[in-house]
Image (tube, rainbow, N blue to C red):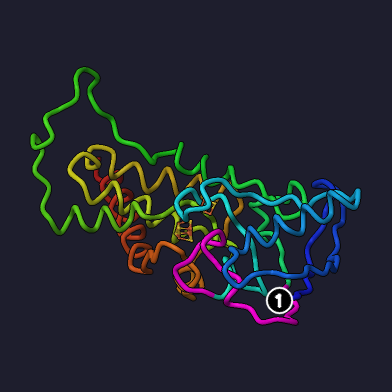
Amino acid sequence: MNITLRIWRQQNPDDKGRMVSYGVEDISPDMSFLEMLDVLNEQLTLGGDDPVAFDSDCREGICGMCSLMINGLAHGPEALTATCQLHMRHFAAGDTIDIEPWRSDAFPVIRDLIVDRSALDRIVQAGGYISAPTGSAPDANATPVARRDADRAFDAAACISCGACVAACPNGSASLFLGAKITHLGSLPQGQPERDARAGAMTAQHDAEGFGGCTQIGECTAVCPAGIPLDMISQLNHDVLSGLTHRDHQ
Ligand code: SF4
Ligand code: FES
């Protein structure tokens, strides 16, 4: 397939940035989207031009590094798929594909398609942990966990912290990410001691980072590669309220 790419190029955070068109030829439908970008970068490098900067690491859909807005959709046209798992068979010969970085005030562009997503790390640092006594590892069955709770925690832990939910949200909210982290720890017995404080601390950090509030639009869950459902935001709201209520009665 021969394809035209229109890619956001931005030298540094202060550069205004612009869309630039490139042609790539002989692209196999079996190539991944990132392999197609590798072909472009080889072409640019051989021609003496700067390659397009983009993030990737595992290329297996588990690390959350790949973060591209493809034709206006976070992670592109295939549901439940991170950019690295998207294949060129979803496009047709002669297509023009727009590729942009995540757009959010809380994710400043570093260069081209790479944004700074450390705001998500700081939200986790604010409360996304449990306290556990040091010493030897506890016996695996020492703390029984009901199957329903284990499944719920496991589903929430599938969040790969990619930030697609933020990029897709008209409010630039990270509430789906936050809901997944809150639900993950709040569903398990080990997460209960800090549960009241956790939701408030993480939500305060979320707001301080410049993410917007949730108005239940649902764009986030539509693009989430991990299938995190909207009701995890309800769990977040429940835990924030419950934390405030318990604090006011202390
Ligand atoms: S909730 Fe989904 S879209 Fe948001 S960071 Fe986690 S995996 Fe990515
Ligand atoms: S590169 Fe790791 S999820 Fe895409």
The C terminus sits in image quarter: top left
Nearer the observer, 35 or 51: 35
Residue 132 x/y as whole percent: 25, 28
- Observer-nearest of 42 and 241: 42
- The spot of residue 91 in percent (x, y) is 63, 78
Quarter residue 239 falls in: bottom left
Q: Nearer the viewer, residue 42 or 192?
A: 42
Disc 1 is placed on an element classified as loop
Task: Specify few, some or many for label 1: CA neighbours under 10 Å numbering under 14, 14-19, or 20 or more.
Answer: some
Q: Which residue is pictured at 48% across the width and 48% down the height?
A: 63
Q: Tell me how many marks there are.
A: 1
List the single residue furthest toward the right. Answer: 48
> Magenta region, mostly helix, strand or loop?
loop
The vertical placement of 160 against 26, above or below, is above
Residue that appears at 57% across and 68% down: 30
User: Is residue 195 a member of the stretch shown in magenta?
Assistant: no
Q: Which residues are magenta?
A: 78-97
Q: Is residue 167 left or right of residue 6?
A: left
Place residue 128 in its image quadrant: top left
Residue 74 placement: quadrant: bottom right
| Position of the N terminus by quadrant | bottom right
Is 80 situated left or right of 120 in this image? left
Q: Is 83 included in the stretch rendered in magenta?
A: yes
In the rendered view, does 246 fall on the left or right side of 83?
A: left
Which amino acid type is shown beneath numbered disc 1? Met
Say which residue appears at 29% left-offset and 44% top-offset: 196
From the image, tell me which residue sits under label 1.
Answer: 1
At horizontal 58% and vertical 54% (from top left) the residue drawn is 66
- Residue 161 in percent (x, y) is at 48, 51
Indicate the position of residue 112 as horizontal and vertical percent values.
77, 53
